[in-house]
């Protein structure tokens, strides 16, 4: 291998300047700071790992870092949109988001592409990226599909979950009931996301998972917009907990029945927004 003269940087490589920056994103508040801090800690831990000898086809460190940053950008933006901190109709700028989140434009662009596939943003040629509008008719059509898939996944998860996954469901159920007691809406939203991720993993059906992935964030955003008007947060949390508990005790029929009751409630909630 040819030696590289001192002071020269190999082609395709750029030095990385690490700086401590104060995160200032007023619209996201403390929750965004926590998410960003968590990401920085994880990134710092990964950076301290000893170098790994890679083959020619192995993923380069730059690609791995970009993937990690894309996931982080997606999680932050998804929560900001689902909790209406980025409201429907808002115009999103890659440059502005990159500056606010302290993440490069390429991961931001890839995260926006994923959000577009989820239906949370709309990419308009020559106009940019907009946060999608919330539509009741769309939500009701979504629930027609969600009823079938969520019931299927609950039964599959109860049959296929590992001991570790069942323990995770038990923890989510307990935390959901605690959130119900104190009516903590943000804790509920985050537990709902964890519930969905566990269900996707434990059901072990990639086709069902892809279908639900298109619906979960839209459903959370719809709920967050209207729950103060018509939702019963303690009831919603208890219904989620009942599904999780049935999976934890390996009860497929019980999990399916609990999932059906949950979707019944969600559909009733959606229809009540007409009168709100």
Image: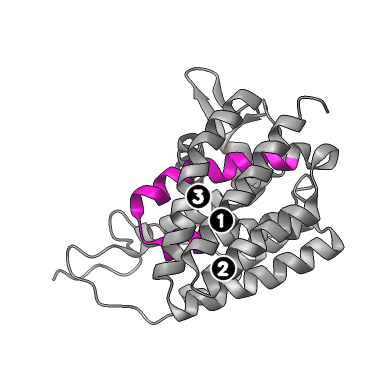
Secondary structure of the residue carrying tag 3 is helix
Residue under the image location 55 percent in, 19 percent down: 127
- Distance from disc 3 to disc 2, alpha carbons, whole Å, reads 14 Å
Find out whether the residues at labels 1 and 3 contact each other: C-beta distance under 8 Å: no
Distance between mark 2 and mark 1 Cα atoms: 9 Å
Q: Which residues are the magenta region?
A: 196-224
List x then y, in percent, for residue 204: 36, 61
Question: Which dot, 1 or 3, sits closer to the camera?
Answer: 1
Q: Which residue is mark 2?
A: 246
Dot 3 and dot 2 residues touching (CB under 8 Å): no
Assess disc 3: are there few (<14), some (14-19) or many (≥20) residues with their C-alpha within 10 Å of its C-alpha.
Answer: many
Q: Earlier in the sequence, mark 3 or mark 2?
A: 3
Q: In x, y percent, where is residue 259?
A: 57, 54
Dot 2 or dot 1, earlier in sequence: 2
The answer to whether the residue labelled 2 contacts the one labelled 1, judged by CB atoms less than 8 Å apart, is yes
Q: Residue furthest left?
A: 1
Q: Secondary structure at mark 2?
A: helix
In percent of width and height, residue 203 lies at 41, 61
Residue labelled with disc 3:
150
Question: Where does label 1 land, which residue?
Answer: 257
Q: Residue 207 colored magenta? A: yes
Residues 46 and 17: in front is 46
Identify the residue shown where x is 61% and y is 41%: 219
User: In this rendering, would 141 be left or right of 58?
Assistant: right
Label 1: which secondary element: helix
Residue 268 placement: quadrant: top right
Depicted 259 relative to depicted 201: above or below = above
Q: Nearer the viewer, mark 3 or mark 2?
A: 2
Residue 271 in percent (x, y) is at 71, 30
Q: Decide: few, some or many residues near mark 1? Use Cα within 10 Å; few <14, some 14-19, many ≥20.
A: some
Local packing at callout 2 (Cα closer than 10 Å; few below 14, some 14-19, many 20+) is many
């Amino acid at each position: 291998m040819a030696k590289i003269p001192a002071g020269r940087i190999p082609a395709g490589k750029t030095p990385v300047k690490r700086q401590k920056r104060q995160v200032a994103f007023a619209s996201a508040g403390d929750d965004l700071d926590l998410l960003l801090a968590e990401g920085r800690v994880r990134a710092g831990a990964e950076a301290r790992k000893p170098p790994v000898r890679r083959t020619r086809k192995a993923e380069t460190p730059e690609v791995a870092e970009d993937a990690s940053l894309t996931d982080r950008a997606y999680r932050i933006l998804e929560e900001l949109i689902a909790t209406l901190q980025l409201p429907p109709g808002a115009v999103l700028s890659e440059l502005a988001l990159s500056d606010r989140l302290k993440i490069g434009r390429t991961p931001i662009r890839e995260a926006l592409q994923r959000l577009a596939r989820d239906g949370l943003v709309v990419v308009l040629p020559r106009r940019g990226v907009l946060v999608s509008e919330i539509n009741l008719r769309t939500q009701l059509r979504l629930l027609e599909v969600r009823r079938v898939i969520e019931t299927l996944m609950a039964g599959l998860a109860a049959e296929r979950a590992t001991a570790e996954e069942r323990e995770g469901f038990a923890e989510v159920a307990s935390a959901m009931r605690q959130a119900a007691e104190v009516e903590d809406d943000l804790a509920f939203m985050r537990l709902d996301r964890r519930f969905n991720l566990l269900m996707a993993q434990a059901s072990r059906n990639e086709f069902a998972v892809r279908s639900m992935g298109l619906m979960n964030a839209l459903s959370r955003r719809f709920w967050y917009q209207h729950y103060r008007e018509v939702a019963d947060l303690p009831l919603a949390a208890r219904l989620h907990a009942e599904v999780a508990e049935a999976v934890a005790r390996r009860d497929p029929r019980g999990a399916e029945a609990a999932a059906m009751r949950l979707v019944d409630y969600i559909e009733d909630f959606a229809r009540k927004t007409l009168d709100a």
